[in-house]
Image (cartoon, rainbow, N blue to C red):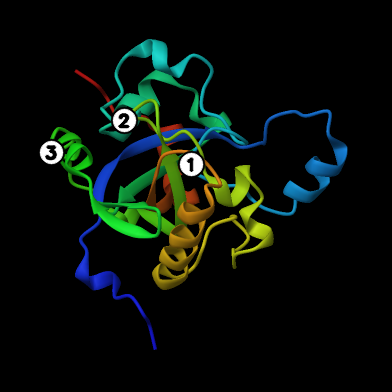
Amino acid sequence: MELFDENKYNPIFVGYFPKNKTIKKSDNKEWLNEISKFEISSVSECIVGGAENWINLWKHNEFGFYNNIETIITNFDIIHFNIFGYEIFPFGIEDENLTNDTKLIENSKKVNQLFNKNDFEFLGYDLVTWSVTDFVECSPLSCNAGYKEFPVNKYCLINKFNDALIAALSMSKREYEPGIYHIMKVYKLRNNLHTKLRRNPPRVN
């Protein structure tokens, strides 16, 4: 029996983002061997980054993502990137308590885009934090080796909302990372559509 019912909350679509297909380089071979067991699909850029200098385009939204896939395709060579879509639950988690996050909700209204989930594969739930900016700063399941304590799948994400919320409540009490915790749903553009878009990019007027 689930302790928490995901259907009580309506996740909000917050945009798309291109992420590299490989993890960042590191001189820590032990860490590399350990993290390489996963197909890291965390929201943060700590381990798998986005395109170099992506922020300089200044076409991102309030969350640091893009409102549409066309912006990604016309500005980046997507052969090097996977395209992800993200939803976030409209509450924060701080010191083992659920809190209202009015700023998040206000920022989400500026996105105002439909998300075609049929084009994407759901990979799991990520736990994220931010404390200084409005962008995701950390994904403790991967960045802080939360995978050693909490149940994760091959993407270093959690399969069930119930497990994700329990993990977030626990992390918030022990301060894996500073800031308010949030739960995000991570989707990846299906491979056949990624190939199609690469070969036949949409025309932009």
For numbered disc 2, what is the local secondary structure?
loop
Badges 2 and 1: C-beta atoms under 8 Å apart? Answer: no
In the rendering, at what x and y percent does residue 125 appear? 44, 58
Kind of residue indicated by mark 2: Tyr
Reading the image, the residue beneath label 3 is 109
Badge 3 density bin: few <14, some 14–19, many ≥20, Cα 10 Å = few
Q: Nearer the viewer, mark 1 or mark 3?
A: 3
Badges 1 and 3: C-beta atoms under 8 Å apart? Answer: no
On screen, residue 114 above or below 57:
below
Relative side of 164 to 147, left or right: left
Identify which residue, 104 or 159, lies in the foreground. Answer: 104
Identify which residue, 77 or 53, lies in the foreground. Answer: 53
Q: Residue furthest top?
A: 56
Q: Which mark is residue 195?
A: 1
In the rendering, at what x and y percent does residue 30 appear? 86, 43
Residue positioned 47% across, 42% down in the render = 43
Residue positioned 64% across, 50% down in the render = 39
Reading the image, the residue beneath label 2 is 66
Q: Nearer the viewer, mark 2 or mark 1?
A: 2
Kind of residue indicated by mark 1: Thr
Mark 2–mark 1 Cα distance, whole angstroms, equals 20 Å
Mark 2–mark 3 Cα distance, whole angstroms, equals 14 Å
For numbered disc 1, what is the local secondary structure?
helix
Relative side of 74 to 38, left or right: left
